Image: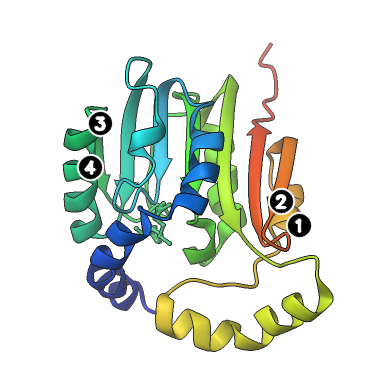
Amino acid sequence: MKKEKLIKKYDKQVKMYESNSKNQRLNGLRNRIIKNAYGKVLEVGVGAGANFPYYDRNSVEIMGVDFSSEMIKSAKRSASIYQVTAEFIQEDIDELILEENTFDCIVSTLSLCSYPDPIKILNKFNKWCRKDGSVLLLEHGLSSNPFLSFTQKVIDPLHTKISGCHCNRNINKMLEESSLKIEHIERYWSEIVYLILAKPSKIDSV
Ligand SMILES: C[S@@+](CC[C@H](N)C(=O)[O-])C[C@H]1O[C@@H](n2cnc3c(N)ncnc32)[C@H](O)[C@@H]1O
């Protein structure tokens, strides 16, 4: 899908993401991963700021990135409601250039499904994250249940056309093919939803 079309699609979905942020079941998982965030945090595909209630506002400084202007507006409102220190960049993550080794934590929730080349984005996380930092992911992907994963593969073209996101991503394989190292993984809801704590792999300079 062309980038401009995808941005418009997400602009139009902002109300839906605002109401999804009240989903208690999902919020339990948001809390579980976001409570690990500290220091300088880069939140990619920040959406309507649904994770903001779960940050320890005394210990984080957030840089939120999203290419949808409507999502950024909504995230700014959420930052103000939950009193988190946050700045925002409206930019395509694919084109975003940031200094290496800058962030203590990189957060991505339900966003890897949207990128044309998610491994490239995971490798950017590896670069941007400090050596001792963490990459915190809450993502959805292929179930381990053969019937569900078959269905996810079959409906993916229609799903992507309607929502802008892929439902057939193989999250484990993507991470294995990236430069990140998985430290901890939990799976929920027929193993469709993944909570992942990953670490960057850095080559020591001499
Ligand atoms: C499925 S929503 C998830 C929003 C939020 N992270 C959450 O947990 O509710 C994906 C978000 O990523 C943004 N997005 C998708 N592709 C992007 C890209 N290439 N660059 C920047 N933002 C992108 C969309 O605008 C949208 O806000």
Give the vertical position of 42 relative to 27 (above or below). Answer: above
| Residue linked to disc 4 | 78
Neighbour tally class for label 2: few under 14, some 14-19, many 20 plus, Cα within 10 Å: some
Residue position marked by numbered label 2 in the rendering: 187
| Residue located beneath label 3 in the image | 86
Mark 3 or 1 closer to N-term?
3
Q: Splitting the image into 4 quarters, where does residue 135 fall?
A: top right
Name the front one of labels 1 and 2.
Answer: 2
Q: Residue 180: percent from the left, percent from the top?
A: 68, 38
**Separation (CA) of disc 3 from disc 4:** 10 Å
What amino acid does circle 3 point to?
Ala
Q: Residue at x 69, y 17 (%)?
A: 204
Left/right placement of residue 95 relative to residue 178 reads left
CA–CA distance in space, label 1 to label 2 = 14 Å
Residue 185, percent from left and from top = 73, 41
Q: Which residue is mark 1?
A: 173
SS type, badge 1: helix
In the depicted structure, whether residue 67 falls above or below residue 152: above
Q: Earlier in the sequence, mark 3 or mark 2?
A: 3
Residue 75 image offset from top left, x and y in percent: 24, 46
- 81 is higher (above) or lower (below) than 90: above
